[in-house]
């Protein structure tokens, strides 16, 4: 088991020898698994930065000329003949933007696999050229591309489609980020609200996570964009759960928010802490967003981020989660106490706690949470006790002994408190199952009294 600090190899071959052939068969699942939709970390095949980018130059025009040489399909040749006279320069393209958009939509709508790559690429460049002028066409473009990407049988077309969406979101992010909810409502069927293939849900979530990450970047200046989309998604999930199964929808939202948190090289994104904070705030506040389906999403996001991160990369996220647990301790309620205990359990248990760089804050929050539970005036704490004692067992087993000893007296006093006595034997049994040595050293003396 990795310590959590060492970097893993970028590719692990579990068996056999990696093929060196340029052309070899790969299954649909293998090809899908390799794809990653992210406009920030991808390099476009056509490098337009080397071209003339004067006031009259056009990304669309430059790309069209290059694709005319690269793609000789009949469908694209027909498109090029119609579009070429309308885009000699940027002012002309702006003048004929309605006709050009109609042409792009018409030829993409034919769903010809041989011509979709240049057409989808050109749609992205068209949006880049138009900027704010593309806003009237945005709904039409997103709906069209999403319908092609979600249903086409070719892996390449799926990748081109969702990559095109990601670039549209990137180029229009200033218009979209202040209120992501209208776009979310357009794409929500692809996020698993309706029956979709698993990879369609993942790609849609990865494309949309770029905007959530942008909203997180401005969180400390303006909380509304991020809070609105989190609250809106949780509320829509609650309504949907009343009429149908939402497991696929939950997975889509987990991927969406986890993608906004995760950074490169096993780290977290600079706005990841803000995204986690917003998720926690929406659960801890007494509103309609707090429900079991939303809590499961937070758990899933946290597990996903832990698997992605190393100890250094997870440090900032852990601090935000512990602040949320502290809020639970200061304002205890039955449902939030259980939530706080589950958060501690996940951080200490996933990857055997290897992502925890400093155990002192974990032990402090565990002790505070236990004390808040035993001192509360709540009529019942059974649900909270199960979660918190499970977390206590894992933390006591995993934390370094020299860090644990100063907290042991307080933790054991709370664990053996009158309010938790009905759960003490179950706690001891679980503790012994996950580590007999520490059970003999730490708990057995209390059982022998």
Image (cartoon, helix red, strand yellow):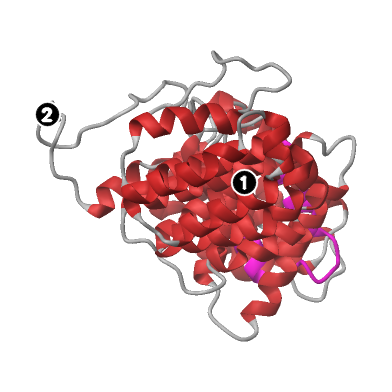
Q: Which mark is residue 81?
A: none
Magenta segment range?
Answer: 273-297
Which residue occupies the foreground of this view, 269 or 356? 269
Q: Which mark is residue 209?
A: 1
Q: Circle 1 — which element?
A: helix
Corner quadrant of residue 172: top right
Q: Residue at x 69, y 54 (%)?
A: 137
Q: At which x and y percent is residue 140?
A: 64, 60
Which residue occupies the foreground of this view, 32 or 429? 32
101 in relation to 233, above or below: above
Q: Residue at x 61, y 62 (%)?
A: 187
Q: Which of pointers 2 and 1 indicates the residue nearer the eye?
A: 2
Q: Assign the C terminus to one quadrant of the image.
A: bottom right
**For residue 331, side relative to residue 123 (left or right):** right
Judge whether residue 276 is colored magenta: yes
Q: Which mark is residue 21?
A: 2
82 in relation to 310, above or below: below
Q: Residue furthest bottom?
A: 243
Q: Residue at x 34, y 26 (%)?
A: 10
Which residue occupies the foreground of this view, 368 or 11? 11
Q: At which x and y percent is residue 159?
A: 41, 47
**Circle 1 crowding by C-alpha within 10 Å: few under 14, some 14–19, many from 20:** many
Q: CA distance from mark 2 to mark 1?
A: 34 Å
Q: At which x and y percent is residue 167?
A: 58, 39
């Amino acid at each position: 088991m990795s310590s959590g600090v060492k970097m893993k190899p970028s590719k692990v071959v579990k068996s056999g020898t990696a093929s060196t052939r340029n052309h070899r068969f790969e299954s649909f699942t293998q090809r899908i698994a390799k794809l990653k939709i992210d406009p920030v970390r991808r390099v476009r095949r056509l490098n337009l930065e080397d071209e003339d980018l004067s006031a009259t130059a056009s990304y669309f025009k430059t790309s069209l000329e290059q694709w005319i040489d690269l793609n000789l399909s009949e469908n694209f040749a027909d498109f090029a003949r119609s579009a070429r006279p309308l885009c000699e320069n940027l002012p002309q393209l702006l003048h004929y933007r309605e006709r050009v958009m109609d042409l792009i939509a018409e030829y993409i709508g034919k769903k010809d696999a041989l011509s979709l790559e240049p057409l989808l690429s050109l749609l992205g460049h068209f949006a880049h050229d138009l900027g704010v002028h593309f806003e009237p066409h945005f709904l039409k473009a997103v709906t069209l591309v999403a319908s092609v990407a979600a249903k086409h049988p070719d892996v390449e077309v799926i990748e081109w489609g969702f990559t095109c969406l990601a670039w549209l979101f990137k180029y229009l992010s200033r218009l979209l980020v202040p209120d992501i909810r209208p776009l979310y409502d357009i794409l929500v069927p692809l996020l698993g609200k309706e029956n979709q293939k698993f990879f369609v849900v993942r790609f849609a979530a990865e494309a949309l996570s770029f905007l959530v990450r942008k909203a997180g970047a401005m969180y400390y200046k303006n909380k509304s964009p991020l809070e609105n989309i989190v609250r809106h998604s949780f509320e829509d999930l609650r309504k949907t759960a009343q009429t149908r199964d939402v497991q696929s929808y939950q997975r889509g939202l987990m991927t969406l928010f986890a993608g906004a948190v995760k950074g490169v090289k096993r780290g977290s994104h600079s706005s990841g802490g803000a995204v986690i904070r917003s998720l926690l705030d929406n659960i801890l506040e007494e509103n309609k967003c707090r429900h079991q389906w939303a809590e499961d999403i937070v758990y899933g996001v946290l597990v996903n981020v832990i698997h992605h991160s190393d100890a250094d990369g997870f440090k900032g996220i852990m601090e935000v989660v512990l602040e949320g647990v502290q809020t639970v301790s200061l304002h205890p309620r039955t449902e939030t106490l259980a939530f706080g205990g589950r958060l501690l359990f996940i951080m200490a248990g996933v990857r055997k706690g290897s992502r925890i760089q400093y155990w002192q804050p974990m032990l402090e929050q565990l002790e505070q949470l236990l004390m808040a539970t035993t001192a509360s005036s709540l009529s019942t704490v059974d649900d909270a006790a199960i979660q918190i004692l499970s977390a206590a067992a894992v933390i006591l087993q995993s934390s370094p002994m020299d860090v644990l000893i100063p907290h042991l007296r307080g933790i054991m006093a709370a664990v053996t408190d009158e309010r938790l006595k009905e759960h003490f034997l179950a706690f001891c049994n679980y503790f012994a199952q996950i580590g007999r040595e520490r059970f003999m050293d730490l708990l057995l003396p209390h059982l022998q009294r």
